[in-house]
Image (cartoon, grey):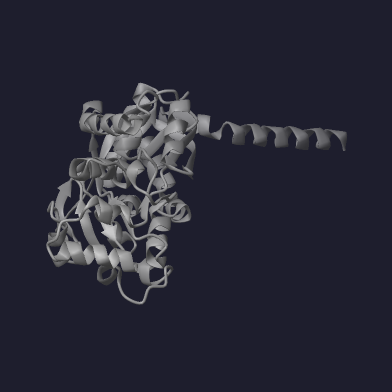
């Protein structure tokens, strides 16, 4: 009996040891390098639960692509930051290895993050500087042309004040700062290009004012919350990315409870200059992000963006693919942020 007991214990220990070493054994067999865990951070451009659900298949897709490129990854952890800055800070700290972040957030944290890819997305059928052109050509729809930049827009909602601003713009009248200062704005965090930086520049160029000069400003933690407030009449206008109304078209009459469509109840009253697309950036301080792994991650995301399954996953951010990026691509973003910083310090 003692012999049988010892044999059983020995077999159990052997099985446990085999399981613990499975990833390493597989890596050795394939000649690949083993990575225990890879962490990815997403900014809350959409509802966090929605992002987590939509990106779940990314784990398998990324593991498969990285295996082909020489890395066997044991676990991929996906999180959504509480705000844009949280993901930038995690990249800088090295607690997150990869971040899908806007250009504005990247520039703010480029001391600890390195851009490796720029997202491409479908161009839109509206690209005019004049909001009236957008309002006459609803709904905004995608085209087959891929674009590496996008617009920020100022959207007026269904509140009484929002409708009044839209009517003035559609009648060909110019808005005054008093018009804009008399309504409640919804903005995003200060590193958001579409939700803060470029709207601030637009205000400065047109009215010699900035967002901090506005009397009534509400900061949202996600665009979903911002559109919810706009639909409820809690805010009158919001700043967002050009195809955001497409993303929240169903929610407008569903979750937000409006009876008419988002295209019938909203109008543009301002259009900002083109903004360079979102980034995939890696942490400079990650303990695992070697040059070889960085190159593999770069190629893996490009490959994923070229597949139908991959396109389904990255569509949560309106991304349709990726192309290699370099730091200097975001020099204009740096200039924009520097101007915003200088304006804010006056």
Which residue is the extreme one toward the right?
1
**Can residue 276 be seen in this snapshot?**
no
Question: Can you give x and y, in whole percent of width and height, for residue 2 in the image?
Answer: 87, 34
**Horizontal relation, residue 225 to residue 144: left or right:** right
Question: For the point 17% across and 61% down, which residue is it?
Answer: 169
Q: Which of these two is toward me, 142 or 20?
A: 142
**Horizontal relation, residue 227 to residue 268: left or right:** right
Question: Can you give x and y, in whole percent of width and height, for residue 227 in the image?
Answer: 37, 60
Tag count:
0
Image quadrant in which the C terminus is located: top left
Q: Which of these two is toward me, 144 or 88?
A: 88
Image quadrant in which the N terminus is located: top right
Image vertical order of residue 274 relative to residue 90, above or below: below
Question: Can you give x and y, in whole percent of width and height, for residue 113 in the image?
Answer: 37, 27
Question: For the point 21% across and 53% down, which residue is it?
Answer: 176
Question: Can you give x and y, in whole percent of width and height, for residue 282 in the image?
Answer: 37, 30
Quadrant hosting residue 72: top left
Q: Which of these two is toward me, 342 or 238?
A: 342
**Can residue 330 be seen in this snapshot?**
yes
Image vertical order of residue 19 relative to residue 144, above or below: above
Which residue is the extreme one toward the front?
178
**Horizontal relation, residue 148 to residue 103: left or right:** left
Image vertical order of residue 338 relative to residue 4, above or below: above
Question: For the point 26% across and 56% down, which residue is it?
Answer: 179
Quadrant hosting residue 161: bottom left
């Amino acid at each position: 009996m003692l012999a049988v007991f010892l044999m059983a214990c020995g077999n159990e220990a052997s099985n446990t040891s085999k399981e613990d070493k499975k990833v390493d054994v597989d890596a050795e067999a394939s000649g690949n390098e083993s990575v225990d865990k890879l962490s990815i951070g997403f900014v809350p451009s959409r509802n966090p639960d929605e992002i987590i659900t939509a990106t779940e298949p990314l784990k398998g897709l990324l593991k498969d692509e990285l295996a082909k490129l020489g890395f066997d990854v044991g676990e991929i952890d996906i999180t959504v930051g509480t705000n844009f800055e949280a993901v930038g800070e995690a990249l800088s700290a090295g607690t997150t290895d990869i971040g899908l972040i806007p250009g504005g957030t990247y520039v703010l944290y480029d001391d600890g993050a390195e851009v490796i890819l720029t997202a491409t997305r479908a161009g839109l059928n509206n690209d005019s500087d004049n909001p009236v052109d957008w309002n006459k050509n609803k709904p905004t729809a995608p085209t087959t042309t891929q674009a590496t930049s996008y617009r920020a827009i100022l959207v007026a909602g269904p509140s009484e004040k929002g409708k009044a601003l839209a009517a003035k713009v559609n009648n060909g009248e110019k808005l005054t700062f008093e018009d804009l200062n008399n309504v409640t704005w919804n903005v995003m965090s200060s590193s958001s290009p579409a939700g803060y930086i470029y709207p601030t520049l637009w205000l400065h160029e047109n009215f010699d004012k900035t967002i901090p000069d506005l009397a009534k400003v509400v900061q949202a933690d996600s665009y979903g919350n911002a559109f919810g407030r706009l639909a409820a009449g809690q805010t009158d206008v919001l700043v967002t990315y050009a195809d955001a109304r497409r993303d929240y078209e169903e929610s407008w009459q569903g979750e937000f409870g409006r009876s008419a469509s988002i295209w019938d109840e909203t109008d543009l009253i301002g259009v900002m200059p083109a903004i360079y697309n979102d980034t995939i950036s890696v942490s400079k301080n990650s303990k695992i992000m070697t040059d070889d792994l960085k190159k593999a991650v770069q190629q893996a995301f490009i490959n994923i963006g070229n597949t139908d399954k991959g396109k389904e996953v990255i569509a949560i951010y309106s991304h349709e693919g990726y192309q290699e990026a370099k730091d200097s691509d975001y020099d204009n973003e740096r200039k924009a942020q520097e101007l915003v910083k200088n304006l804010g310090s006056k």
